[in-house]
Amino acid sequence: MLVLVVEPSKTWVEGLARKAMASGALIRDAGGRVLLVEPAYKATWEIPGGMVEAGESPAAACGRELLEELGLPLPVGRLLVLDWAISVPGRGDGVRFIYDGGYLPDGATLTLPEEEIVSARFVDLAAVGALCAAGLATRVWAAVGAADRGEVVELEGGVPRLQAP
């Protein structure tokens, strides 16, 4: 029996779409407020998290970033939001993941890397839109709803891909 194995061409492989992936966690306090971090390198606030590195799963990246940004080995729960982020000139498009980071334990001490994170604080949901970029604010609001309903929300550019009947 003759088996023909065809290797994909280097040009074809190099031409495949590449997506930048970022992963973060929805962490709340007992009052339902959301933990945001103030990055040193940009004007808008973020949820704890960051870019997924080569060979790393989105959930593993989330756990790594929580440890790096907060100094806490917090458990990474279930996926809450998956959002295909619209292409930005010079950056391309991407995929954003938000996992359930649960509730920060009372008395937990954060250790922020001062070269990266200026501060962290819990904010009411109403303040998320004023502090975060519009796309992230939409993802955070979707994540809170998904966590409360036990769902996963799929977004495309911040808009739900499928609406419930």
Image (tube, rainbow, N blue to C red):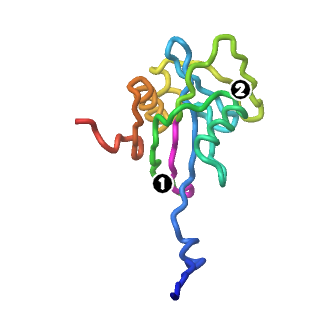
Residue 66 percent coordinates (x, y): 66, 32
Q: Which residue is mark 2?
A: 72
Crowd band around label 1 with a 10 angstrom C-alpha radius: few (<14), some (14–19), many (20+): few
Q: Is 126 placed above or below 14 here?
A: above
Amino acid type indicated by mark 1: Ser
Q: Which residue is mark 1?
A: 87
Q: Nearer the viewer, mark 2 or mark 1?
A: 2
The answer to which of 30 and 90 lies nearer the viewer is 30
Going from N to C along the chain, the mark reached first, 2 or 1, is: 2
Residue 95 percent coordinates (x, y): 50, 48
Whether the magenta-drawn stretch holds residue 97 is answered as: yes
Left/right of residue 61 with respect to residue 123 in the rendered view = right
Crowd band around label 2 with a 10 angstrom C-alpha radius: few (<14), some (14–19), many (20+): some
Q: Is 4 placed above or below 37 here?
A: below
Amino acid type indicated by mark 2: Leu
Quadrant for residue 157, please give it: top left
The residue shown at (56%, 72%) is 13
Left/right of residue 25 with respect to residue 125 in the rendered view = right
* Secondary element at image label 2: loop
Residue 23 percent coordinates (x, y): 57, 41
Whether the magenta-drawn stretch holds residue 49 is answered as: no
Query: Which span of residues is magenta-colored?
Result: 90-98
Residue 151 percent coordinates (x, y): 40, 32
Residue contact between numbered discs 2 and 1, judged by CB atoms under 8 Å? no
